[in-house]
Image (cartoon, rainbow, N blue to C red):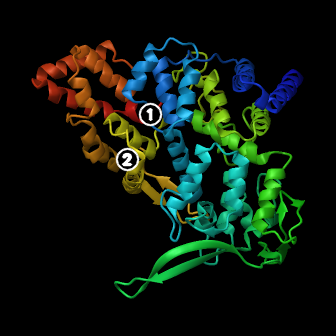
Amino acid sequence: MRALSLIFGLAVLQITTLSVCAAETSDYRLKYDTAVVDQIDLLIRQSWEDNEVSPSEAADDIAWLRRVYLDTVGHIPPLSVVEEFIKNKDSNKYQQAVDEMLDGDSYVNNWTTIWTNLLIGRQTPDRTSRDGMQKFLREAFAKNRPWDDVVYDILTAEGHFEENGAVNYLLSQMTMRDEGVQATAKTTRLFLGTQVQCTQCHNHPFNDWKQSQFWEFNSFFRNARRVDHDKIDPNTGQEVDDYSELTTNDFSGPVFFEKRSGLMQVAYPKYFGNDVEFDNGKSRQKILADAIVADGDHQMARAMVNRMWGHFFGYGFTRPVDDMGPHNPASHPILLEYLTESFVASDYDMKMLVRWITSSEAYRLSSEFNTKNEIDNPAAGEMPLFSHMYIKSMEAEQLFDSLMVASNASGMNRANYAQAMRQRNEWLQQFVTTFGTDENDESTTFNGSIPQALMMMNGELVDTAVKCDPGTLLHQVVSAEEKDSKKVQLLYLAALGRNPSGRDLAAVKKLMQISGNPISAYQDLYWALLNSNEFIFVR
């Protein structure tokens, strides 16, 4: 353990030094990436050795490309990209592929979707502007703004819900007589990786969190105020919604809360029990944001590293990713701390964090078990060792966008981006369920349910994808001057990210003989591939 700690300390020093010299060296990013990725690999290998497991073989190029596309830009790779990647013999093609994704619009759109869902939900709350929230996030990810700056702006935002889209986070948490309860619970979970909601009514049963600490955090949100504006509809003469804005009121007192014994207690704003200067003319949200950014323990960075690792691997260093603390120790504490310090040293560079994770040896591994890593099964409650890739199901948005790629309809331009997003949001609503919790938690029924199966078999998206009309991917493949075996191979690459096996080819040959109509047979084949379990899994 001492040796690993020493390695950790030296590596952080190396990273810090590199960050200072970033502007002076043209190959800074390559050096920075290599130093961090090497350290990730060293620490992960150490956990394999300590737990006596052997990693799976590396995933083949096509499987890796499909995985990294789904995780990074939210959809399967276009067939043309798959073919080009197969032909590319450059040893740096993996890094090149990630760089191209990070520089594209799909990266921005994907992470805008992810964080819009996290911040305000898939179902837009009343008097909240989804367009405003997305505009703020899209700009943040397009410019690769430092994550601490983004969080600061979200927590301190004021003004019109479309002119300053960041206000929609707090607006979405505000309901009548809520008194900042939803904002308290969600802010600590999203940005600090800490669940405090159960201490609203009592002390935490498994750690040292006290009921008072929930209300100390809650005090930071007590002078935030939403103002809803109406207007007269000229056609009906009735008042209708116009816009909402977030302002601050002059709340300056303490918060009172009731203990389970019935006694009333008082709470003042504190950050993890530490006093802050809260009557200094600043809004309490700004005082909280200042405390988070100035936190020498870097809890915001740690929470983001854990969440991002969980996004790419299916499991974070803690389960769940937003419940960190002594009661829930991390599976790889040294690696978590190393990545946290590296993320801070990079100036909270989100793209850099993606590069580190996707370049790691663990991320390159196959999803297949071997005889020496069968115990590495977090789905069965075991601690994740990351000795193979964990299979996860596509999110509903990933499926929608992947079907758009599969039908060759993904080449949308900016002129119809908003229309496509509205279509996607309408499509998603059939899967969303909202629970009446303190955070209006959401779930999706996008989990193999009967409605999902019927939608996939008979829905408009799949129907469009299997049409053989000019311009569709299926038409492009079927009309190509290629042998049937090559056309079958291209459809497998496009849909599943792999070549067909001998058994697959034999089954397709039999299908074509039975059909008697080659085009109909290809449509049936593509329909079957898109409706397969293999299509909807990220592996």
Q: Quadrant of the N terminus?
A: top right
Instruction: Give 248 or 68, whichever is nearer the viewer.
Output: 248
Instruction: Give 322 or 467, whichever is nearer the viewer.
Output: 467
Q: In this rendering, does residue 48 appear at all? A: yes
Say what amino acid the circle numbered 1 marks: Phe
| Residue 341 position (above or below residue 222) | above
What residue is rendered at 30% in x and 47% in y?
455
Which mark, by number, is residue 416? none
Q: Position of residue 528 (x, y in %)?
A: 27, 32
SS at badge 2: loop
Tell me if 63 is positioned left or right of 47 in this view: left
Q: Position of residue 24 (x, y in %)?
A: 79, 28
Q: Position of residue 491 (x, y in %)?
A: 30, 25
Tell me if 206 is positioned left or right of 390 in this view: right
| Residue 486 position (above or below residue 301) | above
Residue at the disc numbered 1: 537
